[in-house]
Image: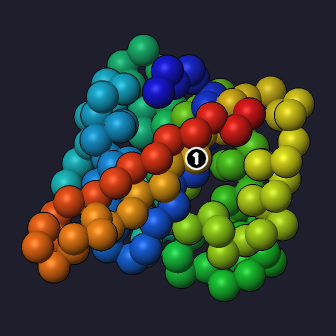
Amino acid sequence: MDLKPSDRVILDGEMGAGKSTFARALLQALGFELTAEGSPSFAIAHEYQRKDQAQAIHMDLYRLESEEDLFAAGTEEMIWKSNAWVLTEWLSKFPTTQKRLFGSKNLGFRVWWVKIIFSESRSESPETRNIRIERLG
């Protein structure tokens, strides 16, 4: 995964699959210092800035219930913001916005889809996940 500033990363997977853990590890790999705040599910979004002024936004849309909520919370603006890495969890709840991201080729940024799946042998190895990464745009 060769991330560039302004790329979008869509994290997909069941509750507890590790989307927030993956996002935090990715942000740390990109050089962002993180506090112990965990998932942004209650705050909706956490914004980060490196010393070189690069920015990242980690959003968890689980608590939002409609496309209207997505717009009212200001998250649509963050998704389309061009100068930050944007990592988004639970975008699958919003098919219209997801379709715009997945279906458009001239967005001005690339979209990565990360699917995190519990291992088929979950009862034997509950901490094992399968991760599929695909570049969509």
What residue is at 39 percent from the left and 63 percent from the top?
A: 117
Q: Is residue 96 above or below residue 21?
A: below
Q: Identify which residue, 135 or 97, lies in the foreground.
A: 135
Specify whether 27 is left or right of 54: left
Secondary structure under tag 1 reads: strand
Any part of residue 37 in sight = no
On the image, the x and y values in percent for residue 73 come to 67, 69
Q: Identify which residue, 131 or 96, lies in the foreground.
A: 131
What residue is at 77 percent from the left and 49 percent from the top?
A: 102
> How many labels were placed on the picture?
1
Position of the C terminus by quadrant:
top right
What residue is at 42 percent from the left and 14 percent from the top?
A: 52
What residue would you read off at disc 1?
113
On the image, the x and y values in percent for residue 121 come to 22, 71
Residue 32: name its quadrant.
top left
Specify whether 121 is left or right of 53: left
Q: Is residue 91 above or below residue 105?
A: below
Q: Is residue 106 above or below residue 34?
A: above
On the image, the x and y values in percent for residue 132 come to 46, 47
Q: Is residue 40 above or below residue 100?
A: below
On the image, the x and y values in percent for residue 33 come to 26, 34
Colouring style: rainbow
Any part of residue 100 in sight = yes
Extreme top residue here? 52
What residue is at 70 percent from the left and 61 percent from the top?
A: 74
Judge the density around disc 1: few (<14), some (14-19), many (≥20) Cα neighbours within 10 Å.
Answer: some
Extreme bottom residue here? 65
Q: Amino acid at mark 1?
A: Trp
